[in-house]
């Protein structure tokens, strides 16, 4: 099941994820002077932990497709897929503890703790996301808290672990965590934009799916926070219906979002978070992060 | 959701689990000279990790009741319950890393690694258990591999972590792990017996439920390994049906198991594993383990 999920061996070749989190970790570690060997275990652990969350999210969100292939639960059923996700979590941390070959016990333990802190925070964020599915309205503050926890925490840990591998200490580690979180916020908002305006090709997901299921994405939350107008009210009415939206209804919501300028607003919000990256990241980290977002948006 | 699961606060009072795993950990730590404060974080971590597996197992097994109360997924739905289980996993390891207040980094890291090794092994065992649901037959060797992974590994880790808290080293740690595993084998076989012949009161589960769902428990696997006889063949026929058994069919299987002496065979197999405990455990650990099994079987 794990080989299937990753599309390895006889299950491949499959479209790979972008591997942004291990990429960020390795980039930070390298920028701070680590040899790549000192950061590979942590990078693998981050990517495996991310995939654990994907396998579980796909069950929780009832998603049958990811990267253009059937999800683990769609192929093997929910019980085996849930358990396979759990196994990925265990494997992630076993891989991380392998880094004792390159680091002191103290440093590996700090990495384990940082990654489990992000793990706990991700669960908080996912719980909010699930609870919001039944909420009548979600405001921008609640949306921000949700993506900070659900998405930004693991990017924060990726950057933090890269710094810990270097090895950085004290303030530098915390600054890298903040940098990763800021990037994570921008990433999620851009991902929300892709989920509405992207194509099947770019994401492997059905475009507009987030709207069909009345997900609280940045463009929608932002649009509903605008003063009453026909376009805003059409979105509100569609989201108030309490059922999955059909293609025509999704199209009407996307039109209303376009009319209000929600896509630009989302891109501006993402740019606001990216300003932290532009101001504080060293050149190679900045270039890695900015170019990875460009890639994701085309 | 987590408070609900444990029956804490406004959700209580609720019947508590037996807490055998943290009990074993504390007993081993104490027997090897640790102060209780040095082992409490690890004991809490073990119990929380066990409950993570329960929350997920209940989803995977479609169990709506545990300890006489509705399971987390039955109350909150599968998506939130799955995620709540994930949160328990993260919390378990955060609690374990809290023990740096009492132990060296090296020792805490060994505990983290040992517990994640057990975690990975539990997932292996659960995967076998789920796969066996569709198997036409499971022999005693396959059954043993399954419970070694699914149940005995965490008892092994409980005992091992108790020794690591003491702090023991080298061979002593491995011997305690083996002791815990042997107890875990006995525990699971006795639990299988309770699942067939126990009452609702003792376990909080519906008696005979394991047979209704054609679970591969020790008594059934043992019975099917006996030479052909009318009683054995009635069990084989019931398990070959491919559907949930009704009360009459369950009763017929239990009668056939009784006729073959499957209950005694299970108790003897459990006693074989307990002989390891009787031979190798120091007095207070031996007494704790034997008395805890007595308790569970009445």
Image (spheres, coloured by chain):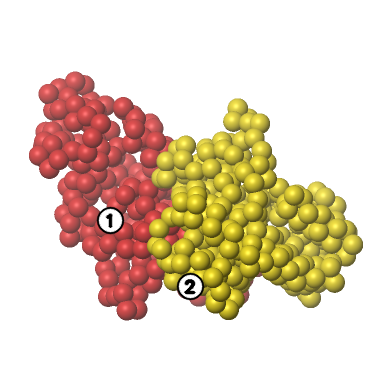
Chain colours: A red, B yellow
Q: Which of A278 and A272 is in front in this view?
A: A272
The residue under the point 62% across, 59% down is B192
The residue under the point 31% across, 27% down is A136
Q: Is mark 1 on a helix, strand or loop?
A: loop
Query: In the current view of this chain or complex, which residue is farthest to the front?
Result: B230
The residue under the point 33% across, 36% down is A133
Q: In this figure, which residue is indicated by the disc labeled 1? A: A64
Query: In the current view of this chain or complex, which residue is farthest to the top?
Result: A228
Can residue B291 be seen in this snapshot? yes
Can residue A31 be seen in this snapshot? no
Q: Nearer the viewer, residue A116 or B194?
A: B194
The residue under the point 34% across, 30% down is A135
* Distance Cα–Cα, label 1 vs label 2: 31 Å
Whole-percent x, y for residue B128 in the image: 50, 68
Q: In this figure, which residue is indicated by the disc labeled 2? A: B137
User: Along the horizontal axis of the image, is B264 left or right of A134?
Assistant: right
Q: What is the chain letter for disc 1? A: A
How many C-alpha atoms fall within 10 Å of the one at disc 2: few (<14), some, or many (≥20)?
some
Q: Which of A238 and A272 is in front in this view?
A: A238
Whole-percent x, y for residue B176 in the image: 77, 68
Q: What is the chain letter for disc 2? A: B
């Amino acid at each position: 099941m794990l080989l299937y999920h990753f599309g390895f061996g006889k299950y491949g070749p499959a479209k790979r994820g972008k591997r942004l989190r291990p990429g960020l970790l390795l980039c930070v570690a390298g920028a701070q002077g680590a040899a790549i060997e000192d950061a590979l275990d942590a990078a693998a652990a981050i990517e495996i932990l991310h995939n654990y969350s994907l396998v579980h999210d796909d069950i929780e969100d009832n998603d049958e497709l990811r990267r253009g292939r059937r999800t683990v639960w769609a192929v093997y059923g929910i019980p085996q897929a849930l358990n396979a996700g759990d196994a990925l979590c265990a494997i992630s941390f076993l891989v991380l503890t392998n880094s004792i070959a390159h680091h002191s016990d103290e440093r590996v333990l700090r990495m384990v703790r940082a990654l489990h802190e992000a793990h706990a925070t991700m669960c908080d964020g996912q719980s909010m996301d699930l609870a919001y599915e039944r909420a009548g309205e979600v405001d921008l503050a609640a949306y921000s808290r949700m993506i900070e926890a659900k998405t930004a925490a693991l990017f924060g840990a990726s950057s933090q672990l890269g710094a810990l591998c270097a090895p950085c200490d004290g303030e530098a580690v915390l600054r890298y965590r903040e940098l990763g979180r800021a990037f994570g916020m921008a990433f999620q908002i851009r991902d929300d934009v892709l989920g509405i305006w992207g194509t099947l090709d770019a994401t492997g997901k059905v475009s507009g799916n987030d709207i069909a299921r009345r997900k609280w994405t940045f463009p929608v939350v932002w649009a509903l926070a605008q003063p009453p107008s026909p376009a805003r009210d059409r979105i509100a009415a569609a989201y108030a219906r309490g059922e999955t939206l059909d293609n025509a209804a999704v199209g009407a919501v996307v039109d209303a979002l376009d009319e209000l300028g929600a896509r630009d607003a989302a891109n501006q919000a993402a740019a606001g978070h990216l300003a932290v990256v532009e101001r504080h990241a060293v050149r190679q980290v900045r270039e890695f992060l900015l170019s990875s977002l460009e890639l994701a948006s085309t």
